Image (spheres, grey):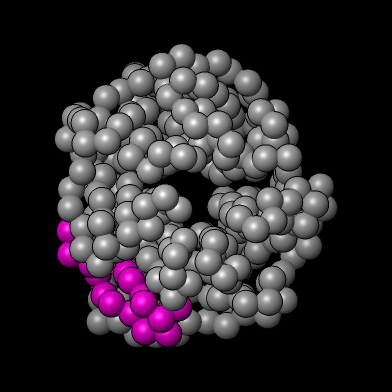
Amino acid sequence: MAIIEDGEPRLSLEGWGARCLAVDPASPDTLYVGTTDEGLFKSEDGGAGWQRLSGIEHPRVTAVAVSPADGAIYAGTEPSALFVSRDGGASWRELEAMRELPSAPTWSFPPRPWTSHVRAIALSYADPDLVAVGIELGGVLRSTDGGETWQDQRPGAQPDCHNLAAHPESVDLVYEAGGGGFARSRDFGDSWEPADDGMDLHYVWGLAVDAENPSLVYASATSGPGRAHGGGFSGASIYRRAGNSRWEPVLKDLASFPYALCPDPVTSGALYAGFGDGTILRSADSGERWEEIARVPSRLQALAAVAA
């Protein structure tokens, strides 16, 4: 896992299979990292030291998010389940109603069709009870009461959800990157519409929204899962969309797949991209020009930029 602090990347939690990452909006030194088979870890010193948290039933933690509205921590797992902590990770409770939805028996991850997982979590900046969850592969689910009850697969959302993103300046807006394209919701996940005009590649994975401008969005995509995850030439692009314009590529025909995109938290127009081969690029001008700032061990999946 790579953390970018004041523009400088550093590795943290090496060797533990880190796969997802969340920064506490109220305390940027507090980080949560989900791992492939070792559970969830917490750091309160910007990643210098870590403690493993207990109370989550499944060791494969595939998504984690901290509510900007009330500080609750949500962790999603494989098999698909969602847990919440309201005491900084000291204790956890499963939100069992999610697993009881009518569509749950149909959720299936193609490489391991007997299971599925929570791939993405979006939390409202305005309402602590609004939660959107993306299942790979099972669609986008929505709760209006902090996960106690759920609305099943939301119409118009991509069923193969890879990423969700909300924004503090437009609290009803949520974006989704999915295996069949890009989607947008204007009512915090209740209904969705396709929003991939201009993309010529539709297996979308990485997603980032500018820190200040909710209509300036970036996404990474390639032609299919084999290109993204197969280890060969990805042929991927990083796209940019500003306002209601069409998507336009800012990097094309990439050898390695850009799994992780994240905005600089204090500089509008600044963006980081992390690649499967361990390369980390930075753009200071909304993707017009790029520079390599680091190269870390391969299979980089999670990237966060924090203000020191």
Position of 105 with respect to 123 (left or right) is left
Quarter of the rendering occupied by the C terminus: top right
Residue 61 x, y percent position in the rendering: 56, 63
Quarter of the rendering occupied by the N terminus: top right
The magenta segment is 139-156
Position of 144 with respect to 262 (left or right) is left
226 is higher (above) or lower (below) than 254: below
Displayed quadrant of residue 50: bottom right
133 is higher (above) or lower (below) than 163: below
Position of 9 with respect to 151 (left or right) is right
Residue that appears at 26% across and 45% down: 182
Q: Is residue 147 magenta?
A: yes
Residue 26 x, y percent position in the rendering: 65, 58
Residue 36 x, y percent position in the rendering: 58, 57
Q: Is residue 274 magenta?
A: no
Total tally of numbered discs in the picture? 0
